[in-house]
Image (cartoon, grey):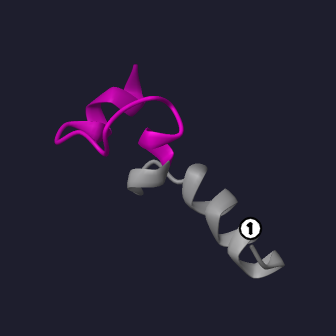
């Protein structure tokens, strides 16, 4: 991966509005109630 791709991937994994965030935490993708889960 290029530095830009690495940076984009890292940003995506830190963004709870992105599927990569949830996938990096073992989920299939962003759940429908992801905003509620963030509050917990």
At horizontal 75% and vertical 80% (from top left) the residue drawn is 4
In the picture as drawn, the residue positioned furthest to the left comes out as 32
Residue at left 31%, top 38%?
A: 28
Please identify the residue farthest to the right as the structure is shown: 3
Query: Bounds of the magenta span?
Result: 21-40
Quarter of the N terminus within the rendering: bottom right
Q: Is residue 32 magenta?
A: yes
Residue ID for mark 1:
6
* Left or right of 33 on screen, residue 39: right
Q: In the image, is residue 1 above or below residue 28? A: below
- For label 1, the SS is helix
Q: Quadrant of residue 32?
A: top left
Residue 11 against residue 35 in the figure, above or below: below
* Name of the residue lying farthest toward the front: 1
Label 1 crowding class (10 Å Cα cut-off): few <14, some 14-19, many 20+? few
Q: Quadrant of residue 7?
A: bottom right
- On the rendered structure, is 20 left or right of 33? right
On the image, the x and y values in percent for residue 39 come to: 39, 27
What residue lies at 58% left-to-right and 51% top-to-bottom?
A: 13
Residue placed most toward the observer, 38 or 2: 2
User: What x and y, as percent, mark residue 3?
Assistant: 82, 76
Residue 17 is situated, as x and y percent measured from the top left of the image, at 39, 55
Hey, which residue is sitting farthest top in the picture?
40
Residue at x-position 29% and y-position 39%: 34
Closer-to-camera residue (6/38): 6
Residue 7 in the image: above or below residue 2: above
9 shown above or below 1: above
């Amino acid at each position: 991966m290029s530095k830009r791709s690495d940076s984009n991937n890292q940003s995506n994994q830190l963004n709870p509005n992105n599927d990569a965030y949830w996938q990096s935490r073992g989920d299939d993708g962003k759940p429908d109630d992801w905003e509620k889960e963030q509050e917990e």
